[in-house]
Amino acid sequence: MRSAIASAGGFIYFIIHALDNHYDVYKDHQNRWALPIGSASYHKILDIPYYNQQTAVWCGEATAKMWIDYKSPNNPTQLDIAQWVLVTFGPQGAEDRNGNGMIDPEERAIWPLEYGSVLNHFIPANKYHRYVSASPDEIIGREAHLIAEYHEPSAAVVEMEFPGDPNGPPNNAWHWLLVVGCVADGWPGSGGVNIFGLWVHDPGGWFTTIPAYVSSDIWKQKYFEVYLDRDGVNGYMHVEDPPPGDKRINHLLPIRCKPPTKPYGTPVSLQQVQRIAEEGLGLYLLNIMGPLAPYLQQAQHGMPVFVRSLDPKFGDCYIVPYWKSGRVTAMVIVDAVTGQFHGAAACNVNWIRFPPISRKQAEGLAFRLSPKKVRTMELVWCFCEEAPSPYTPLWQVIYEDGETLFISQKGTIHRQLKRHSCVGERR
């Protein structure tokens, strides 16, 4: 067990932090931790291997492999998992994306109803299943409880619709994120505490290979969404390991997802955006403990960059880059309307500026494609194949005649944006 005293925003915080691969004492730390006097921040982060979603399969197979490799000596490939799903459950709901007249394993995604069976087969066990609730706070509370008490992650069903798509359960689009850690002001196993945020692995490229931090309130507002499963069950859902005989998980005191930072309203200056980013990092202690600390310690915040959202649900935001030794090492998102601290992610690529494709470079690429006069150029984002992460927005170029093109932060040019592969016609 490791503890420290830190100061943030004028308050003294007692930090208790556990990474479950460090010392044997961490393995049974829930019986040793006691609530300190005053404010506290509890960080619990599971040491779960990260895998990118392979192009031939879905995000469900990738999150399942992370979980399986963490809990079991079995080491199936993502394609092995996809093949088992197709053989076991059949082709229901799949699309013939390859156009070969048949359903291949990589065309059959894992539905929430089926995900527990996948884990039970490959781990093996007989305990994993889908859990559904009308309350996103309850789901977050269970995720934190399972991480803290039982070192079990949770696979969360989230939706990020492509602009123009009908929003809600009937669209049958979903994306899997693996919740691997939590931050709270008390021991999550006891209930009745504030869950400040979650650490997540995203196999689809929303974030980097380092676990990203998302505030609980933002998680509920922008990522978590009511979903309609194959059996007609409707609600907020995730896949979990319900511990046998543990009655507390069904009788927890209310979990509050109240962030330590408050909504400030629309920021009035870029300096205020920087202050909100700094306050969020300090109050969540992300610059002291956890996977992001090495990327934030001794780093200086840069100038916030405004990003217009093409998806009304996600909303406009500012991205605040953090710099160390001439490189971008981390990024923070602040909501441009509410002024809320959204979350943070590491930057483990070699960026010497943010955005990596500057406006001048984007203008040059646009002019090279067409010498027409540009009417507007701005950074935008939506859930799409060309920019799967909100931390890597696109340049949208609109010419005087209305023609539009998009330029990614890799310098690729696109006439139009494609739905993310997780958003299918009949998923």
Image (tube, helix red, strand yellow):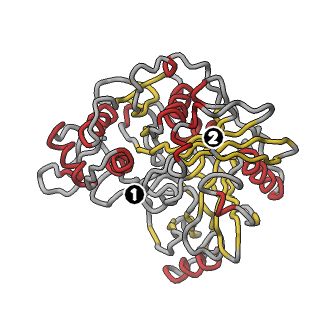
Q: Quadrant of residue 130?
A: top left
Look at the image and tell me whether residue 41 can be seen.
Answer: yes
Residue 24 in the image, given as x and y percentages of width and height:
52, 46
Q: Nearer the viewer, residue 172 or 155?
A: 155
Secondary structure of the residue carrying numbered label 2: strand
Position of residue 413 in the picture relative to residue 230 (left or right)? right
| Residue 153 - label | none
Disc 1 residue type? Tyr
The 10 Å Cα crowd at callout 1, few under 14, some 14 to 19, many 20 or more, is some
What's the residue at 81%, 53% (across, down)? 275
Q: Nearer the viewer, residue 253 or 203?
A: 253
What's the residue at 18%, 44% (across, down)? 86
Q: Quadrant of residue 302?
A: bottom right
Disc 2 residue type? Val
Where, quadrant-wise, is the C terminus in this rendering?
top left
Report the residue marked by disc 1: 51
Q: Say whether disc 1 or disc 2 marks the residue closer to the N-terminus.
A: 1
Residue 205 in the image, given as x and y percentages of width and height:
46, 58
What's the residue at 17%, 52% (across, down)? 104
Q: Nearer the viewer, residue 104 or 424?
A: 104
Report the residue marked by disc 2: 183
Where, quadrant-wise, is the N terminus in this rendering?
top right
> How far apart are labels 1 and 2 at the CA level?
23 Å
Look at the image and tell me whether residue 337 can be seen.
Answer: no
